[in-house]
Amino acid sequence: MLASVLKIKELWHRLGSPRWFFEYSGKFIGFFGVGALILLVVGFIWGLLIAPPDYQQGNSFRIIYVHVPAAILSQSLYLAMGVGGFVLYVWRMKLADVLISACLPLGMSLTVLALFSGAVWGKPTWGTWWEWDGRIVSTTVLLFLYIGIYALREAISDSELRGKASGLVAMVGTINIPIIKYSVDWWTTLHQPATFTLTEKPSMPPEMWVPLLIMVVGFYFFAGHNILNRMRAEILQREAKTAWVKNLLVKTN
């Protein structure tokens, strides 16, 4: 037990080293990239071409294979930013700010995709592009949080102050995540409940929810690949004057 705790503590301290993270994370780039490609291709083909049409919505329901993964990932990435902000304030790890910077553009893009695909889905389902629905409004707030953090990081030139300010907003904004998740339970809403839960079996038949699950996992793999690449590029930029980066550039050239 003590040995395990010491290993976890050692790993935690290593995460504070940009050089160690850069060298170690490179081992997972290919894994996440290949995994994302396979999962997304399988899930996309299965969901769009093989899964049966919904008995009420027909083929229009198939946008679920883009909408649900995008919505889940947009929340997960913001939560990761909030955790990064907490770590930055408590332990002052440089990599926490790198994580926030790497998650920001992808999370913002996926939030836009979730709102757009939801509007496209809502038109034939609800008869309108927009509804003052708890989940739609709270997801729109999430987009504004992403935009606000992006604008904040662009406006502040001092790297330390930029990290602290964006980390604080990310932490405070995490209160919106449970609102997005539980809005369908707290208020009257047109939105359907969560497709996947830990306590209940999905209401859809397996031939419809299995490809959706594959797409969700595929989106996570894609996010892992994208974020690791962004973090590694950010580390090289920030550590450009250090000896290990200079030696690395000499070796690669």
Image (cartoon, grey):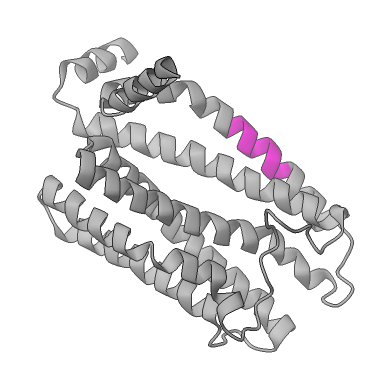
Image-based side of 152 in relation to 2, left or right: left
- Residue under the point 32% across and 46% down: 84
Question: How many numbered discs?
Answer: 0
**Magenta-highlighted stretch: main secondary structure?**
helix
Above or below 104: residue 64? below
Image-based side of 96 in relation to 58, left or right: left
Name the one closer to the observer, 27 or 4: 4
Above or below 221: residue 139? below
- Residue 126 picture location, percent across and down: 70, 86
- Residue 119 lies in quadrant: bottom right
- Residue 150 lies in quadrant: bottom left
Image-based side of 94 in relation to 189, left or right: left
- Residue under the point 45% across and 52% down: 77
Magenta residues, start to end: 33-41
- Residue under the point 36% across and 23% down: 11
Above or below 26: residue 76? below
Above or below 9: residue 73? below
- Tell me the quadrant of the picture where the N terminus can be found: top left
The outermost residue toward the left is 158
- Residue 247 picture location, percent across and down: 23, 12
- Residue 245 picture location, percent across and down: 23, 20
User: Does residue 71 belong to the magenta stretch?
Assistant: no
- Residue 226 picture location, percent across and down: 47, 40
Name the one closer to the observer, 209 or 218: 209
- Residue under the point 48% across and 66% down: 178
- Residue 231 lies in quadrant: top left
- Tell me the quadrant of the picture where the C terminus can be found: top left
Image-based side of 231 in relation to 240, left or right: right
